[in-house]
């Protein structure tokens, strides 16, 4: 009798579907998965809040929780180059989706090193970027975030900073989730449509805000805003160059450029050191403003960022 009661108590929880566990490399993409997946998905980010995706090391606990995941969404941030293979082997049954697929990737700005030409390597890097699924495995994992020392052009992984590209990305997330849980496909489609409407409204708002500004150049420490800049006709000037801080000579040149362009603000992000940004800001009599490309509250955050850029670009 007792056994029978226990069984009755257990049955509902056994039949209730567990939400699909989905990992994303960074917080904004976790948000996109959560927006589309709604109650059917348990979305997580590998790079935890406040950590830097360029240098992140997943914890052993995180690697262990991958075993319950059905999908991993990567985006080419540098820690993936070292970790994708271990992430895949932690759960070979897990689907891996590349959030960059179908998006034309931009190169990181201003490559002026002379020891390597912009020849074959660059093209190879491009081919990887648009890679076919089955080719994304070993080679591209290692080659993707190109090693500057080997002469490959480094491709910019920060695709999510442009809301128009995000509409494309969430369409692919909807498709992927619908394949994994066809019963919920209508919910995924509805959630997707709601979120895309929100993204389109945000895009219109940002155009209204940024299009009329006479100054079009902004300065950042880490170049995370290239896709955002492209979308609104702005130009990002970066202090960091190919992931490295400039030396005294490079810094002096940047200060000259900032003065010439009448740049008054240096944008930083919470995950990076602010020392050099402060140095430049001081030299140009300007300020340092923090904007976060990795915030989880994507739409509100991008709206805030838009206002901060508009403030900095006012004459
Ligand atoms: Zn970055």
Image: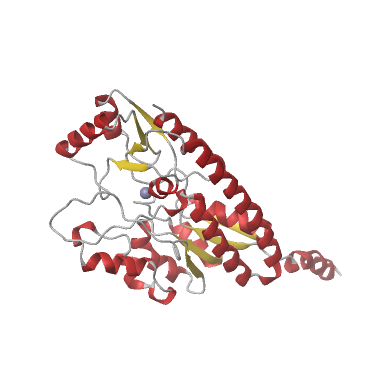
Question: How many numbered marks are there?
Answer: 0
Q: Residue placed at 51% from the left, 41% from the top?
A: 206
**Corner quadrant of residue 39:** bottom right
**Corner quadrant of residue 90:** bottom left
Between residues 90 and 191, which one lies in front from this camera angle?
A: 191
Can you name the residue that lies furthest to the bottom here?
134
Can you name the residue that lies furthest to the top here?
285
Question: What scheme was used to colour the molecule?
Answer: secondary structure
Between residues 122 and 182, which one lies in front from this camera angle?
A: 122
Q: Position of residue 258 (x, y in %)?
A: 27, 32
Q: Position of residue 193 (x, y in %)?
A: 65, 56
Q: Is residue 22 left or right of residue 122?
A: right
Compared with 223, 119 (above or below) is below
**Corner quadrant of residue 285:** top left
Q: Is residue 11 left or right of residue 226?
A: right
Q: Position of residue 63 (x, y in %)?
A: 46, 61
Q: Residue placed at 24% from the left, 26% from the top?
A: 283
Between residues 58 and 189, which one lies in front from this camera angle?
A: 189
Location of the C terminus (image quadrant): top left
Determine if residue 301 is in view: no
Q: Position of residue 56 (x, y in %)?
A: 38, 52
Location of the N terminus (image quadrant): bottom right
């Amino acid at each position: 009798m007792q056994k029978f009661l226990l069984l009755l108590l257990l049955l509902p929880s056994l039949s209730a579907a567990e939400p699909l566990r989905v990992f994303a490399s960074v917080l904004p993409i976790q948000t996109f998965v959560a927006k589309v997946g709604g109650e059917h998905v348990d979305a997580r980010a590998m790079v935890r809040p406040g950590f830097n995706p360029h240098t992140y090391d997943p914890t052993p606990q995180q690697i262990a929780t991958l075993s319950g995941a059905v999908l991993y969404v990567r985006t080419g941030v540098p820690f993936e180059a070292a970790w994708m293979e271990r992430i895949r082997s932690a759960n070979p049954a897990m689907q891996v989706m590349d959030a960059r697929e179908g998006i034309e990737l931009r190169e990181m700005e201003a490559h002026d090193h002379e020891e390597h030409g912009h020849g074959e390597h660059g093209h190879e890097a491009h081919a990887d970027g648009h890679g076919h699924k089955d080719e994304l495995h070993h080679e591209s994992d290692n080659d993707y975030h190109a090693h500057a020392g080997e002469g490959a052009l480094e491709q910019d992984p920060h695709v999510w900073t442009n809301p128009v590209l995000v509409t494309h990305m969430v369409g692919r997330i909807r498709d992927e989730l619908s394949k994994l849980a066809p019963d919920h496909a209508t919910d995924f489609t509805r959630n997707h449509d709601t979120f895309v409407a929100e993204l389109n409204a945000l895009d219109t708002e940002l155009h209204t805000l940024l299009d009329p500004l006479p100054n079009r150049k902004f300065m950042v420490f880490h170049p995370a805003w290239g896709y955002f800049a492209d979308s609104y006709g702005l130009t990002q000037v970066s202090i960091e160059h190919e992931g490295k801080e400039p030396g005294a000579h490079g810094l002096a040149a940047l200060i000259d450029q900032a003065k010439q362009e009448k740049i008054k603000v240096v944008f930083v992000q919470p995950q990076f050191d602010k020392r050099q940004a402060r140095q430049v800001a001081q030299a140009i009599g300007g300020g340092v403003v923090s904007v976060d490309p990795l915030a989880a509250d994507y739409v509100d955050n991008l709206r805030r960022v838009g206002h901060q850029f508009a403030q900095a670009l006012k004459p």
